[in-house]
Image: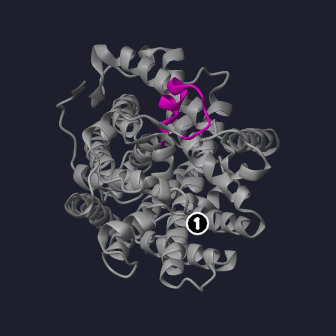
Amino acid sequence: MALNEKETEESVPNETMEKPESTGQVEQHLNKVYNVWTASAYQVLMMASWTCNLVLYSTVMTLGGPMMLIYSTIIVAIGQGLVMASLGELCSVWPYSGGQQTFTKHLAPPVARRFLSYCTGWVVLMGEIGTAAGIVMNSAQIIGGVVQLSQPRSELTRWVTFLIYAALLILSLLFSLSQRHLPAVAVLGGFITLFGGIAWAATFLALSPKRDTSFVFTEFINSSGYTSSAWVGIMSFYTPVYALYGTDGIMHIVEEMQDAEKSAPRAMIWSIIFSGVTSLLGALVMGFCIGDWEAYLETDFPIIPWFVDTLNGSVTGGSTMVLIVIVFLNFLIAVSVNVAGSRLAWGMARDHALPWSNFFFRINHKLETPLHSTLLVVAAELALGFVVFGSNYAFQAIVSMGNAAIQLGYLIPTLVLLVSGRKALPGERAFSLGRLGLAINVLSVCWTTIIVIMLFFPLSVPINSENIMNMNWAVMMVGAVVILVTADWFFRGRYQYQV
């Protein structure tokens, strides 16, 4: 893969920016506030790989144990790296906030171009919303779990959980309103991700009883109910995929990047390398310091008693501080995901893919941000929180859609590129995969297909009335989104959507 050395402007004022494809609207542009390093920090923050291993403690110890976490992290890092290389090349050609939707509308066969790109945009947008909602709810539950441990007589009602969830969402909205401060938020999150991970690793390595190398590298743990060890090995990809799948974020902020054609692919590649390495190191530390995992799995949030046992035997000391770091990182990740979702919605509005697109395409020039699109995304997430009052199962169904929808968004553009042929790409581009392009694209499609299929299966079986929470609702929810989007296409979208 190679970068074209042709010089481009490092920063271009909004007034002289080359206009995105015209859709008949008054052109509106965002300031270019990110460079390759702040964009890389933004992407590293979105993945926050080491924290994902921790919050999915029970999944790790159900599907293969530390051994499979370590080996699957290596495989997933390579697979996701291929995906990012493929998408990075497309991003260098079409650096627009629509991301996967934009790639698909340029690459899909003419007969399917409008409908397929329309569906792609909506599926990815729903994935961003579901992902952010899941992150914020996870933080709300961790906060509630800490409160319950410190105050055993307290009761964490659904109403209290929702209030914490809503407060975190509103706070994330405030953090994302001022565009010029977003790079600073990204850098702050990147530093906390790096140094917080180092602090966690050093502390646990110093204080935790250690498992031997035989347990870490050779003991296969399977309490999932699946009888095929090979399938459990594939299912063990779930945790590292969760840690390394937020890699599409940069594709939605490219219109805010300096020299985006070069900077975006570089940031995508460097961030996946960095996150892959830190995720692997985190998996190794977790394996050696895993603690009394069988006892921890009996609790609702295994990482809380794990931290308490390792650090100081109480919930009021170092364990709380580490959990606060994780919650704060989750919060900053939610800010970043909401920025990506709002920019995607803004890009879709430019193409009239949203109802009331002219309204959602407007930029608030005091804040220099697409305020209406940002409010739309956060309002949708807030509405999802009300589902908690009806059923935790229903909320879990919505959240489970996020990962699968994002992965589908990775698959579709690369697949249509293979169908149309790499000749559909311009000969000169800032980032090129060169002669390896076809092989990387094929491997990327194969890898993402495996991951999408895996994400549609439950993490443990059998599924019955006693453990209905183990049900994976992703396939049902993605199917529901596709049905609703298709209906919207026939009643509204096909008359308004422009490519």
Regarding residue 367, the answer to whether it shows in the image is: no
**Residue lying at 43% horizontally and 34% vertically, measured from the top left:** 220
- On the rendered image, what quadrant is the N terminus found in? top left
The residue at which mark 1 appears reads as 378
Residue 499: where, in percent of width, then height? 60, 36
83 vs 481: above or below: above
**Residue lying at 59% horizontally and 75% vertically, measured from the top left:** 166
Left of 330 or right of it: where is 161? right
Element type at mark 1: helix
The foreground one among 485 and 383 is 383
**Residue lying at 69% horizontally and 67% vertically, measured from the top left:** 383
- Amino acid type of the residue that numbered disc 1 sits on in the rendered structure: Val
Q: What stretch is highlighted in magenta?
A: 223-238
409 vs 142: above or below: above
Residue 309: where, in percent of width, then height? 36, 68
**Residue lying at 50% horizontally and 34% vertically, measured from the top left:** 410
